[in-house]
Image (cartoon, rainbow, N blue to C red):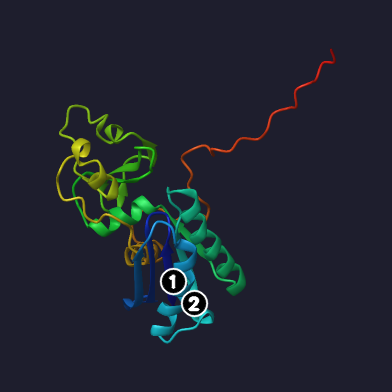
Amino acid sequence: MLVLAFDTATAAITVALYEWIPGEGVRRRGAAEAVDRRRHTELLTPSVVGVLADAGAAPDDLSAIAVGVGPGPYTGLRVGLVTARAMGEALRIPVHGVCTLDVIAWASGRDEPFAVATDARRREVYWARYDSAGVRATEPAVGPPSDVLKGADGAPPPPVIGEGAALYADVLGDGDPAPLLPSAAALAELAIARLSGRPGPELLPPEPLYLRRPDAKEPGPRKKVTPR
């Protein structure tokens, strides 16, 4: 069973191909990583094509797709989701969404409480707290970096990882913030763990996880013009 995974919810354009043989194990067949906040559209498809080609695989060989659903900036996020849904429909295979914060948490391998924070721009972060790498303790949220440390009930603030922790180290602490960005390898491993029935963050529909209202608003009713 071949699982293609990719995430474009952050500055990372990350792709991985994993082979899963139920009852036997999992192995990575290929991966590609790039970091570019402005070129998700240009880089994703060539990365997918290159990873499949390097592995000697074709799109028809795929059994499932796993895609990061954010939270993240709209433009980059939609590139991955539209691509995943289009491929899933064309190939008639399932597409599974995974929260991008969960992907970073999973890659950390931590077994003590911590938080993940990514860059939400506007001097805010997308964030969530975790009891361990595979157990999220709060729903994803967006807000100023200081929100990540609130509500600890007198306990020491948790260590924070992710790009948001590096950007706002003055607020979130100067510990090791790695991993900074999601990895499609971790995304594939998380998705396969859940598909095989092992504990971990839930799989989601391949729909964007938006935490902000859109900037654009529907126009209101036209004002009446009163003749003089």
Rounded to the nearest angstrom, the CA distance separating label 1 from label 2 is 7 Å
Contact check, label 1 and label 2, Cβ < 8 Å: yes
Which element carries disc 1, helix, strand or loop? strand
The image shows residue 80, relative to residue 211, as above or below, that is: below
Task: Classify the position of the N terminus by image quarter.
Answer: bottom left
Identity of the amino acid at label 1?
A: Leu
Percent coordinates x, y for residue 74 in the rendering: 49, 49
Which of 217 and 223 lies nearest the eye of the viewer? Answer: 223
Task: Name the residue located 61 percent from the left edge and 68 percent from the top edge.
Answer: 89
Q: Quadrant of residue 151?
A: top left
Which of 27 and 42 lies nearest the eye of the viewer? Answer: 42
Percent coordinates x, y for residue 43 in the rendering: 44, 68
Q: Quadrant of residue 188?
A: bottom left
The image shows residue 26, relative to residue 220, as above or below, that is: below
Q: Earlier in the sequence, mark 1 or mark 2?
A: 1
**Residue at the limit of the structure toward the front, as seen here:** 228
All told, the count of numbered labels is 2
Percent coordinates x, y for residue 16 in the rendering: 38, 71
Identity of the amino acid at label 2?
A: Leu
Which of 24 and 30 lies nearest the eye of the viewer? Answer: 30
Task: Classify the position of the C terminus by image quarter.
Answer: top right
Neighbor class of circle 1 (other Cα within 10 Å; few <14, some 14-19, many 20+) is many
Q: Which residue is mark 1?
A: 4
Q: Which residue is mark 2?
A: 62
